[in-house]
Amino acid sequence: MKIQSEAIVRPARNISGSVELPGDKSISHRYAMLAGIAEGPSSLENYSTGADCASTLGCMRALGVAWERKAEGQNTIEVQGRGLSLGAPTDPLDCGNSGSTMRMLSGIVSGQHFTSEMMGDESLSRRPMERVIKPLSAMGAQIDSQQGKPPLRITGGSLKPIDYKMPVASAQVKSCLMFAGLFADGESRIEEPLRTRDHGEVALRAFGVKLDRKSAGPGSEVRIRGGQRLHGLETRIPGDISSAAFFLCAAAIFPGSQLVIPNLLMNPTRARLLDILMQMGLRISVTQLDEIHGELVGSLQVEGGKLKGIAIAGADSAALIDEIPVLAAIAPFTEQGIEVRDAKELRVKESDRIAAVATNLRLMGAQVEEREDGLEIPGGQTLHGAELDSFSDHRIAMAFAVAALRAEGETLIRGAESAAISYPAFFNTLEELSER
Ligand code: S3P
């Protein structure tokens, strides 16, 4: 049984201090999977502390990959890769709450000569999987599902290459198909309609895979040949920018904030949030830019200011998909408000994030217009403390902890334990950074 916990967030005066983030969730998943199918050992320092990335490691172990933590309490994972051929699991692969685990790993198990079952929790069981089932089936995998939803039963084998234009902009699907492409007999081409995060491409290259990439209209295309062997990787994972988003937005709502964030992921396909917050009035300077195996890392110095409103639409909505909940949660504190369009994908995340944001903002007394593909939230509003629900969604729990800092009175967040899906230390760290 899941143990539910509540968090109480009191209003703050400012955000001040320095915070270094655990390793990026998107990169941690991909490195753990690729390390498992590499030849030889890998060492992944600053691996994500989130439960989602632990789900990926659990699945890799069930597929016969040996790994261990370097030392108790440390976030360095040492993986013994076993090459492209994994071991048949004896039990269903438990993906927990993690859509990334199920979607990306389905590409790898589709290339294995055995049957795997993949299951998840209640939220994951509601999420659409036809976006991977359709192309993987076209490559030759046999997949049974519950009308396109988990659990999945995948019988893999030698795959045919695919030439595929993805109908939805999804980095998880893109990575799934590139991973499956490693097991195909020939070259696969995968095209995305809008540019999404490119950690799959960057990680494959870091593990020694050759692939061709180019832009294709507003999106991009990747070509990858099957049968390539991966070598192990020794690296350090940059801090998670989607987790940093909560502290950046918390700093943004107080003009006197001062925040330092060292070793943060600055990959251009993830860093749109920084441009948007700067356009809104936050002062951000970046120092010590560095590149680690193709991923950009930098240190941020952040100062609050007056916060203007903004409209987020089109390619920005895809680029900011994980950060929109917290941007929307602070929208009432901006001068002109925030409008979000073209973000229908938010309805099929860990919760229906459009509905969850609208419900919680209204409970705090805000005026909100909810639309099928977004939200319109006027600025210049005052919020009051309220009793809110996380909807069992980590990003909703954290987004409203941030909004609560500038509300009048205390806010209670039910299901606050969900934060541990991506960032177990979140509530403690937020408390440490909040000046009262
Ligand atoms: C992710 C991609 C996004 C994002 C998710 C992680 C990834 O999902 O919402 O949290 O690591 O590729 P989609 O690619 O399905 O939009």
Image (spheres, grey):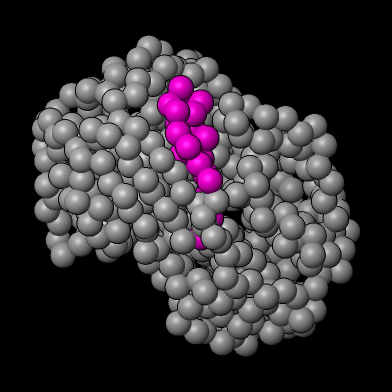
User: In terms of depth relative to the viewer, which is nearer, 89 or 345?
Assistant: 345
Direction from residue 366 to residue 136 in the image, left or right: left
Residue 381, by quadrant, is: bottom right
Query: Residues in magenta?
Result: 194-214
**Residue 229 x %, y %:** 35, 20
Residue 404, by quadrant, is: bottom right
Q: Does the magenta stretch include residue 88?
A: no
Residue at image position (76%, 37%) is 299
Residue 391, by quadrant, is: bottom left
Placement of 158 over or under 354, stated as above or below:
above
Residue at image position (44%, 44%) is 222
**Residue 268 x %, y %:** 65, 47
Residue 403 in sight here = yes
The residue at the far top in this view is: 40
Q: Does the magenta stretch include residue 199?
A: yes
Numbered circles on residues, count: 0
Q: In which quarter of the image is the C terminus?
A: bottom right
User: In terms of depth relative to the viewer, which is nearer, 262 or 106?
Assistant: 106
**Residue 386 x %, y %:** 58, 75
**Residue 295 x %, y %:** 61, 34
User: In terms of depth relative to the viewer, which is nearer, 209 or 44?
Assistant: 209
Residue 397 in sight here = no
Residue at image position (23%, 33%) is 185
Residue at image position (49%, 32%) is 203
Direction from residue 37 to residue 277 in the image, left or right: right
